[in-house]
């Protein structure tokens, strides 16, 4: 049996590079609660990403839940159904009602043309996602938010290192959140962060992630435990030494896929996002109706060949039981998101993916065509 080829694999630096970090943790015995690695990693990340205020979290979901708390978001929030379920779950965890708005067919991000029609007196914020690390139309979203007095919280879980002409895309909106999960381009195994625009917001978020403690005897809010521990922070510092090399490798794999898949009828890949620095977090294809077999048949065919592509993001969030009764979850309100969820397939892309694995993936996709030519369905 061939080695499985997964949609992603974490990039792990040489094990011996971890040793000195572990020795420091063992020596000073500060394991969590804002220890030295936590402080160092927060600063190093600010420098790397080109932002001023970062609060580290134990994962991206708690970062998002806490960011919404910190901004005191209530009522209804406009968001995309085309994302990982944590995006909408963070709203429910805050007693907020998600209002789903359709996506743009090119970027697969929230369609700014459709946001205004969904705003009501209950709307307090917009929660867009830079899906696959492809920047949202941040200018249009901000101008709508300004007109209607709404906050903007960016779920930037996929967008580590992405920049537009003005710098990091994490600077947009009222806050942005990142995920450093093991499946992400930059990982601390589990981990996340909130990027704030000013010291005041960061301070409030830092209270909230530490039970609401302002000092040893003062609790200013019903906070949660969202703290990143020293081991995670050490992993982050170590990863930062290698992230540029990892992103370069991803860029090369992305280029190879584009070249290899260019002439397969019915297979369409997304155009490169329009930004000055990309992170190549996912390689996304759409299996269109002219492709001889369905998306799900291709997905199964890849699995039969030990290639574990993923249907991110199918089903749509709006189809899950806790959301589907919402009026905005109706399929007729979300035609582009529904069609995209039915066609999408994310192909394996990660540093260390060897050329032969990429070629096998492309061969199976090409095979879908020859299968039809020979009159056999997968
Ligand atoms: N917002 C958005 C837009 C998100 O995409 C996410 C997370 C969040 C918010 C929340 O952030 P976190 O709270 O997670 O920090 C994964 C991840 O669990 C999730 O972090 C991620 N998005 C989502 C898109 O994908 P699964 O269930 O698809 O992962 P899993 O375990 O099936 O892994 C996929 C493949 O990756 C495996 O087939 C093999 C490989 N893998 C995975 C892990 C965990 C490894 O090689 N090593 C590993 O340790 O959800």
Image (cartoon, rainbow, N blue to C red):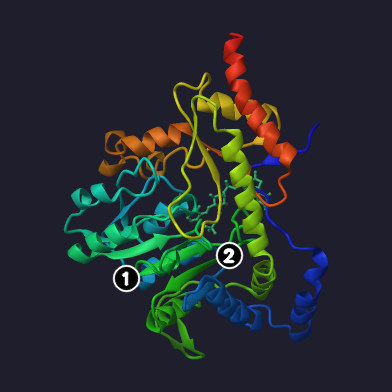
Q: Is mark 2 within 8 Å of ligand 1?
A: yes
Quarter of the image with the C terminus is: top right
Residue drawn 56% across the image and 80% down it: 43
Nearest to the observer: residue 165 or residue 189:
165
Report whether 51 appears left or right of 122: right
Q: Which residue bears the numbered disc 2? A: 191
Please name the residue shown 36% across and 49% down the image.
80
Question: Is 77 situated above or below 339?
Answer: below
105 is higher (above) or lower (below) than 59: above
Label 1, label 2: how far apart the Cα atoms are: 23 Å
- Residue 233 x/y as whole percent: 64, 73
Q: Is residue 224 left or right of residue 353?
A: left
Does residue 110 appear in the picture of this structure? yes
Quadrant of the image occupied by residue 190: bottom right
- Total number of numbered discs in the rendering: 2
Q: Position of residue 155 (x, y in %)?
A: 43, 59
Up/down of 294 relative to 330, above or below: above
Going by the image, does 184 lie left or right of 18?
A: left
Residue 219 drawn above or below residue 341? below
Residue lying furthest top in this view? 375
Give whichever of discs 1 and 2 has the lower sequence position: 1
């Amino acid at each position: 049996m061939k080695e499985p080829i997964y949609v992603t694999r974490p990039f792990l630096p040489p094990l011996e590079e971890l040793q000195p970090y572990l020795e420091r943790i063992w020596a000073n015995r500060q394991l969590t609660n804002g220890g030295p690695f936590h402080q160092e990693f927060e600063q190093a990340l600010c420098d790397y990403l080109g932002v001023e205020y970062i609060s580290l979290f134990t994962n991206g979901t708690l970062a998002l839940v806490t960011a919404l708390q910190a901004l005191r978001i209530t009522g209804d929030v406009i968001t995309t159904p085309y994302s990982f379920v944590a995006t909408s779950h963070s709203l429910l965890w805050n007693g907020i009602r998600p209002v789903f708005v359709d996506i743009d067919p090119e970027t697969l991000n929230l369609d700014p043309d459709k946001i205004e029609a969904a705003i009501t007196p209950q709307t307090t914020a917009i929660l867009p996602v830079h899906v696959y690390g492809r920047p949202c139309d941040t200018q249009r979203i901000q101008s709508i938010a300004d007109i209607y007095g709404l906050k903007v919280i960016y779920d930037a879980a996929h967008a580590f290192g992405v920049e537009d002409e003005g710098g990091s895309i994490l600077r947009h909106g009222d806050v942005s959140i990142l995920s450093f999960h093991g499946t992400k381009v930059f990982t601390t195994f589990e981990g996340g962060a909130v990027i704030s625009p000013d010291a005041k917001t960061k301070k409030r978020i830092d209270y909230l992630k530490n039970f609401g403690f302002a000092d040893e005897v003062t609790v200013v809010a019903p906070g949660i435990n969202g703290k990143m521990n020293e081991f995670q922070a050490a992993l982050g510092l170590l990863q930062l030494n290698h992230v540029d090399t990892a992103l370069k490798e991803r860029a090369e794999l992305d280029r190879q896929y584009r070249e290899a898949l260019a002439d397969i009828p019915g297979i369409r890949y997304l155009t490169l996002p329009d930004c000055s620095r990309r992170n190549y977090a996912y390689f996304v294809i759409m299996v269109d109706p002219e492709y001889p077999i369905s998306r799900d048949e291709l997905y199964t065919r890849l699995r039969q060949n030990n290639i574990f592509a993923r249907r991110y993001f199918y089903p749509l969030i709006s189809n899950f039981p806790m959301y589907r009764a919402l009026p905005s979850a109706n399929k007729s309100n979300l035609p582009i998101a529904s069609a995209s969820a039915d066609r999408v397939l994310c192909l394996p892309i990660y540093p260390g993916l060897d050329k032969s694995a990429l070629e096998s993936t492309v061969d199976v996709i090409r095979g879908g065509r020859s299968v039809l030519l020979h009159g056999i369905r997968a």
